[in-house]
Amino acid sequence: MAVEVILPRVDMDMATGKISKWHVKDGEKVTKGAALFEIETDKAAMEIDAPADGILRNILVAEGGVADVGAAVAYIYAEGEAISSAAPAAAKPVAQKTDAAVPASAPASSAPGAHINGEAPRATPLARRLAKEATLSLDVITGSGPRGRIVAADVRAAADAKVAAPLRAAAPQPAAMDDVQKLYQPGSFDVLPVDGMRRTIAARLTQSKQTVPHFYLSVTCTLDKLLAARESLNASAPRDGEKKPLWRLSINDFVIKAMSLALQKVPAANVTWAGDAILRHRTSDVGVAVAVDGGLFTPVLRGVETKTLSAISTEMKQLAAKARARKLVPSEYQGGTSAISNLGMYGIEEFTAIINPPHASILAVGAGVERFVPVKGQPVLSTQMTCTLSCDHRAVDGAVGAELLQAFRSFMEDPLLMLA
């Protein structure tokens, strides 16, 4: 019997995925575990392995096509296995979601209310119970489980959508594109389509500003000792055969390390809001915003408090490169308790950042600026940097946020504390 190749869920927020490349052509032999196709989500591009040995047939979603999570995109037949004459030919490249039919000889793929041989929709017992409690029909729920099976998470998502629908209807709706365009002279602008990444950024950050009660705290750090330590450490970095340094520390590496240690020193700030509970985390998992063409990603460095500055620098460069190539995997950008957004390299001296849930805070880092500061009554030229912490007031109170910033500043102004 043919094995269904489904579009898997590789991200908790993923509803659809775009197939950017097939590594095997229709009619070619495939090996279980070998790369079969590549999908592109709003956050990354990932290779998907073949689920079985055999011959790839009936590619339903061609390169450039989009499919729902759990939907069939092709089938793998055993060598010599008969293929139904009703099976469709290979799909043509598309620029939008593909609605190709499923071959008559193959199992039905997941779709809202998908049935097999007239039976009830496939669903787990827990999903059925939750649907009954929420007075939801399984016929209108798309399954994301194996072979399109409806799981509890699918029902909860449908229930949330049912609750939110009246609120969305009552909320002011953004102006339609045509209405906005009418405000400007024809020919005076270019229309740039909104891609999946930009749409996700817009949705998540709008949700954050509307549902997360932000408050802001700022502090100014004097960097003279840090700059001297950075210069000394970079000068002593080990070198390769061509006498090039194996690593080079940036100010941002010190910022990441200082934030991780501050979260350890103030554990009440190393938290996330989970609705009915607050999660207090044992390690400092810090996200760092990375600008890419058309948007940004926030890869997460795990257990930063245990890592050396050189290890942080090396890992951050690797994650940034993967982010720019859109090759991050979910484990590299999901989770985290706080994040850092550094616009200092653009000359921005001070700004505030929007929290990226589930993080409970984000640190906006400005540029280092030379200023005269009074020292024992005398003006002394120093390099100072302004940092602004955005906090989720549901999980972090003002005093706790202040303690976190105070600890962060102490590490930045005395970097030897980071090396202890």
Image: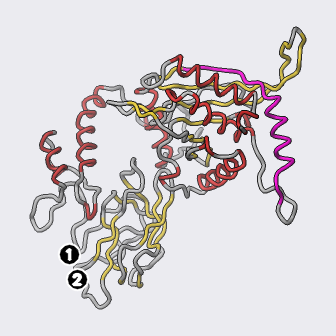
Q: Identify which residue is drawn at 48% across, 24% down.
A: 396
Q: Which residue is mark 1?
A: 104
Q: Is residue 231 magenta?
A: yes
Residues at marks 1 and 2 touching, judged by CB atoms closer than 8 Å: yes
Circle number at residue 84? 2
- x%, y% of residue 76? 33, 78
Q: Identify which residue is drawn at 27% across, 38% down.
A: 160
Q: Identify which residue is drawn at 56% across, 41% down.
A: 287
Whichever of labels 1 and 2 marks the residue nearer the N terminus, that label is 2
Residue 289, by quadrant, is: top right
Q: Which residues are magenta?
A: 216-239
Residue 319 is at least partly visible in this image? yes
Q: Is residue 84 left or right of residue 205?
A: left
Residue 181 is at least partly visible in this image? no
Q: Which of the colour schemes (rainbow, by chain, secondary structure, one colour) is used? A: secondary structure
- x%, y% of residue 116? 14, 66
In the image, farthest residue toward the left: 118
- x%, y% of residue 32? 40, 77
Q: Nearer the viewer, residue 159 or 375?
A: 375
Q: Disc 1 marks which amino acid?
A: Ala
In the image, farthest residue toward the top: 377
Q: Is residue 239 above or below residue 379?
A: below
